[in-house]
Image: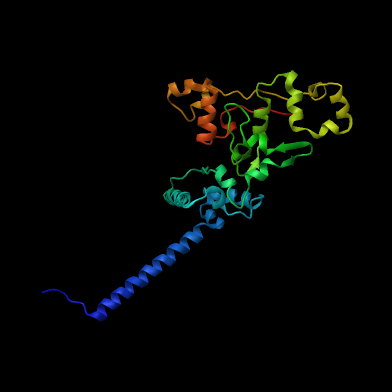
Amino acid sequence: MGFKVSKEGKAKIILIIGILFTLFVVFSVAAIVYTERPEFCTTCHIMDPYYESWQASTHAEVNCIECHYDPGLKAHIKGKIVGLVQVAQYLTGRYSEKPKAEVSDAACLREGCHKKEELVNRTVEFGNTIEFAHAVHLESPGKDMRLRCTNCHSQSTYEEHIKVDTNTCFLCHFKNVGEDELSKQCLNCHKKIKAVGSHKEYIEEGMSCSQCHEEVKSGNAEVRRQVCYFCHEDRGTIDKIGDRALLHKAHIYENKVDCISCHDFIKHN
């Protein structure tokens, strides 16, 4: 004997299912909207210092996901999945005290943010005497080098959110540069001093910056073999440390490793 449902009963079941489905959709949308708010990041206490540095930064009006999610629906969905995994790790106590997050060039150059065309045609002042041109750095500054935005606008610490890390500047401009070439490198950045006060006179006379300024450069940003063991165990992989092109391709562009994670520091006084 089968169980029969009246028309009124079927209508009620369909109504209940419709209400439940509607509630599920509304709840899901609300959850997505809420979890994409910057304030949600502080649900995990380890995010507090990063949130505070974001609030004090020039990107304070930009939602976190605008930088940390690549443009497009596929990237957005991937970002949500990664975020859910991080929440699960936090709730189960399997999280890292230093969370890992990336900012891709595509996120920086997305519609409504930084336009590559505008950056290429614009020179910005950095400090008192430095003129910085994005054009040189956005292209290929070296035959085996391709930089990302965050190579210079570092995200390695939470004290300064997406702040220019001058250690990267010193590494690129001073590595393997001898005393006879120092002045050329100095004037590549400190362009204004060519026409300011006594510096103009000294430059016209052909004097070297290091004749007056001691310790312009200290160190040579070596890559110590033992640093490789922090990430790699295979000796065959580590033996490739001399292949500059391969190392830059694998670390800088493909795996987004900060330059100073491998290189020693260069001091510039």
Q: Evaluate whether residue 221 shows in this view.
A: yes
Q: Residue 250 appears at what percent x and percent y?
A: 50, 30
Q: Which quadrant of the structure image shows residue 195? A: top right
Q: Residue 183 appears at what percent x and percent y?
A: 77, 24
Which quarter shows the C terminus? top right
> What residue do we see at 68% from left, 25% from top?
174
Please name whichever residue, 9 or 188, is drawn nearer the observer in this view of the structure: 188
> What residue do we see at 70% from left, 41% from top?
121
Q: Residue 154 appears at what percent x and percent y?
A: 61, 40
Q: Residue 133 appears at what percent x and percent y?
A: 70, 37
Which quarter shows the N terminus? bottom left
Please name whichever residue, 263 or 105, is drawn nearer the observer in this view of the structure: 105
Q: Evaluate whether residue 159 shows in this view.
A: no
> What residue do we see at 56% from left, 47% from top?
107
| Side of 30 relative to 149 (left or right) | left
| Side of 184 relative to 176 (left or right) | right
Q: Which quadrant of the structure image shows residue 258? A: top right
